[in-house]
Image (spheres, helix red, strand yellow):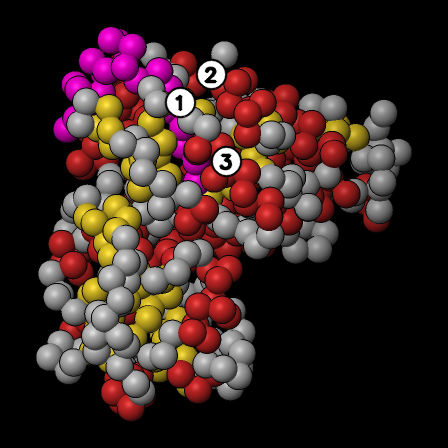
Amino acid sequence: MHCNQCSQTLNGIACTKAGVCGKNEDVNSLQENLIYALKGISAYVYHARELGHVDKEIDSFLSEALYSTLTNVSFDLERFLDLNLKAGQMTIKAMELLKKAHVEVFGKNEPTEVSTGTAKGHGILVTGHGLKALYELLKQTEGKGINVYTHSEMLPAHGYPALKAFPHLKGNLGGSWTDQRKLFAQFPGAILGTSNCVLIPTDKYRDRIFTVGIAGLPGVAHLEGYDFSPLIDKALSLPELPEEPGPAITTGFAETNILPLADKIIAAVKDGKIRHFFLVGGCDAPGKGGEYYREFVQQAPADTVVLTLACGKFRFNDLDLGEIDGIPRLLDLGQCDDAISAIRIASALAAAFGCGVNELPLSLVLSWMEQKAVAILMALFSLGIRGIYLGTKPPAWITPGVMEVLQDKFDLRLTTEPARDMEAMLS
């Protein structure tokens, strides 16, 4: 079936609900997906620019792609699919740019145990993705009797040498962005929001939270130029935190410290000690649906390895999965943009085994589609990676016609039940 006005079809998608000039729900779906991807790319480029790194090709694409979503610019379904895949390519470049910036400024990641408890003293809790803001805060709080804690996507900061060198960077509190209102109300110190994933505060802590950079909240003081004096003064005026030790979690893995183990990993695979790798990551979402990922990781057989990244890991990163020949079974690669490390690891292992990434004993299980997750999914599609599991709900803006194309071209699958999906991946 073809649209009576534009007569276009895209691998089976036809204009079944044509509007003016044949515009239809599938074009709208691809446009909306593209806009989400552009938002994710922009976030990575913003943080890279904070650290002095820019890329003209990415900047050029952002304007071209965003322009293409304006009213009556294009009604070409195939072109919008191509633009989404090109957004994936730009996501890879953006993640590479940001990773380069992080490593040049803060050093190469190092596996690090991070306390989840508190130390006696005044405290500041930092949430978001802005490592530049955290670094400036750590410098300004030296010797002031203030301990700094990370929250959510700030956890990976503890794996960078230049950041963990500050002795008053004490630990990580809470889980993903979804626990903010409860955690921040209980935290007696001052709070800093550095990026997206910050929620409108309740009255219980509105006077104790500040924002910097891109972040902004109604009725909350915004700090300009990385001058954290008001935040520091507020922290010193508040009660000290008690000494309350907590269990440790580990972060700081990357291709720079995993690939040196490649020979050991390859030998373990060939000897049958490692049967399969799972990349379980993405953005956390509120609600019980996220329990799927904890149950999935808990059911992972003892001869498998789980790589993870982004805030979705807080569903299960407290689990002790042990080791296989000295190789940790749970490897936290960092923030969502550190998906570039996962891509590099998979590519290197594929080269070592003499096969393609799709032939590796590797399954990708991704959670919740928000802007950055969309950008990363498009990046994986642009690399030709197939068989990705996505859940626990399909993206609301993806029409049945577009979903059919993604399933046909990339074998995209939706999660069902942990045991059922695990069996399918291991078969």
Task: Label 1, secondary structure: give it.
Answer: loop
Classify 424 as above or below 195: above
Amino acid on which disc 2 is placed: Leu
User: Is there a contact, CB below 8 Å, between mark 2 and mark 1?
Assistant: yes
State the residue in front, 388 or 248: 248
Task: Label 2, secondary structure: give it.
Answer: helix
Residue neighbourhood size for the residue with mark 1, other residues' Cα within 10 Å, grouped as few (<14), some (14–19), many (≥20): some
Classify 154 as above or below 342: below
**Residue 259's x, y, as percent?**
20, 29
> Of callouts 2 and 3, which one flags the residue occurring earlier in the amino acid sequence?
3
Which numbered circle lies on residue 426? 2
State the residue in front, 137 or 66: 137
Residue neighbourhood size for the residue with mark 3, other residues' Cα within 10 Å, grouped as few (<14), some (14–19), many (≥20): some
Amino acid on which disc 1 is placed: Pro
Task: Give the residue displayed 31% in from the left and 25% down from the top.
Answer: 347
**Residue 22's x, y, as percent?**
81, 41
Task: Give the residue displayed 16% in from the left and 80% down from the top.
Answer: 145
Residue interval drawn in magenta: 260-281
**Spatial separation of the CA atoms under disc 1 and disc 3:** 12 Å
User: Is there a contact, CB below 8 Å, between mark 1 and mark 3?
Assistant: no
The residue wearing badge 1 is 301
The residue wearing badge 3 is 295
